[in-house]
Amino acid sequence: MTVRLRVRPLLLVLPLILTGCSSMSNMSWPSVSWSGMNPLNWFGSSLTVSDKGVGGITSSTALTETAIKDALDGDYTLRSGMSMSGGKMLSFFQAMDGKDVKMSISGEPKGNVQRVDVLDPKVESEWGVKIGTSFSSLYSKAFDVCVKGEGDDAQNIECKAPQSAHVTYVFSGIWHGPESLMPSDDALKDWKVSKIIWRANPVQASTAQ
């Protein structure tokens, strides 16, 4: 009888341990990852945009397929290419999910990563900003923090993240005014983040491009 009484409480506690009960989370168990056992982490990307980079990509990451794939934990397939920007030749890798481009990683040939353009809705900044976040939830005015986009983003605006000089957010939306002018603050309220950009070199709002 004594043995049965000791075994029953242990059997009741085991399910709580396996589900990562907060009261047991400080115990040391070999080869157990509490975050990996959380169903919320079974789906989507674990990559985050921060002041230092995107996932494992930082300013010291070589612009090579091997280095980038390792820094992205192999979450994407990569395809490479070359482009011109400001009269300079750039190398880039596109991080693909099937046929969809989720990220563009670029820099000077044989150099390190200088810029990452994030298009993946599953990847958000460490401050909780992701594709679809509204302008009004981050800013009250565009003055001194936003500029008109250029190139493929000519119809959009790009705004410096409040917490980082390395991160900017590209917003897209409807504007019925002249294309050459910055949309009014009232119009921008409902614009949404369509891209998150990280740059190795810090930028000012007036020179975000």
Image (cartoon, rainbow, N blue to C red):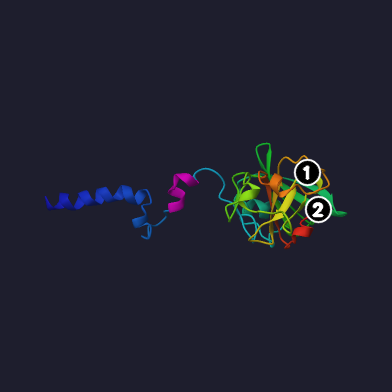
Instruction: In the rendered structure, find residue 70 and report the number of the disc placed on it.
Output: none
Q: Nearer the viewer, residue 95 or 209?
A: 209
Percent x, y of residue 151: 81, 46
Residue found at x 66% / y 61%: 164
Q: Nearer the viewer, residue 163 or 99?
A: 163
**How packed is label 2: few (under 14 Cα within 10 Å), some, or many (20 or more)?**
some
- Residue at numbered disc 2: 90
The amino acid at mark 1 is: Gln
- Residue at numbered disc 1: 155
Percent x, y of residue 44: 55, 44
| Residue projecting furthest to the left | 1
Q: Nearer the viewer, residue 168 or 37?
A: 168
**Majority secondary structure in the magenta region:** helix
The amino acid at mark 2 is: Leu
Instruction: Magenta stretch: give its range.
Output: 34-41
Percent x, y of residue 13: 28, 51
For residue 140, say whether it is visible.
Answer: yes
Q: Is residue 189 left or right of residue 9?
A: right
